[in-house]
Image (tube, rainbow, N blue to C red):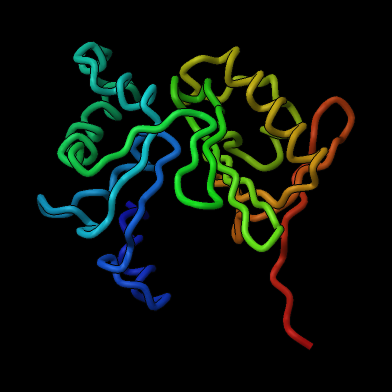
Amino acid sequence: PAGGRLVERLRAAGTAPEAIDVVVLSHCHTDHIGGLMRDGHPTFPNARLVVGAVEYDFWTKPERLASEPSGNEHASALVFRANLLPLAARTRFVAAGDEIVPGIHALAAYGHTPGHLAFHVESAGRRMLIWGDCAHHEVASLAEPGWHALFDMDKGQGAATRRRIYDMAATDDIVVAGYHTSFPSLGYVAPSGAGYRWIPVTDQFEP
């Protein structure tokens, strides 16, 4: 009930949906693809889409709809068919390591879904990591990377991915955009005991 506000938020920030030319998807869960179509039309009419080939192939298989109707997989499969499948002709399918556009590269982050991707974004000598759903809570997910997240489809691989991604972010001191972290959803990762901790980037007033 609190979703579906992307277009109004973009307009408030001065960007029309028609101005978006590339939409890059980390994976195909409902909260990441559910707004791609509105009233039977593409939300971003001039955009091409980018998604992992492994991810897309997984969700196109008919057995996804054969899963328990009350389960998350079935619900995501329905949203996939309503929102992403109709846009197949304008979708590019990529693999880990591919360059999406100049300065943006895909990074394997499998486990949450079979083809989940993160992305390195580089500009003017600086780098940011967009890690998609590599964390579902900025305290629990980082403090205990081995804990199984409810929505991880491969629990073991998800835990291994979290440790690898967190270690990279901490070692390289990269600013991270985390989808399920608190506003402003930007921060750094630091080692903490056997796990890690999230250090948020806070808004500062100009002097």
Residue at coordinates 33% horizontally, 37% vertically from top-left? 30
User: Which is more toward the observer, 68 or 54?
Assistant: 54
Q: In this view, does 9 lie above or below 143?
A: below
Which residue is at the far right? 193
Using residue 29 as the reference point, say whether residue 149 is left or right of it: right
Query: x and y percent of residue 103 in the render?
Result: 56, 52
Q: In this view, does 63 lie above or below 206?
A: above
User: Which is more toward the observer, 103 or 182?
Assistant: 103
Residue at coordinates 83% horizontally, 42% vertically from top-left? 190
Residue at coordinates 36% horizontally, 51% vertically from top-left? 23
Quadrant assignment, res 118: top right
Using residue 160 as the reference point, say whether residue 10 is left or right of it: left
Which residue is at the far bottom? 207
Query: x and y percent of residue 15 in the render?
Result: 36, 73
Q: In this view, does 92 lie above or below 144?
A: below
Q: In which quarter of the image is the C terminus?
A: bottom right
Query: x and y percent of residue 197 in the render?
Result: 79, 40
Using residue 195 as the reference point, say whether residue 115 is left or right of it: left
Quadrant assignment, res 86: top left
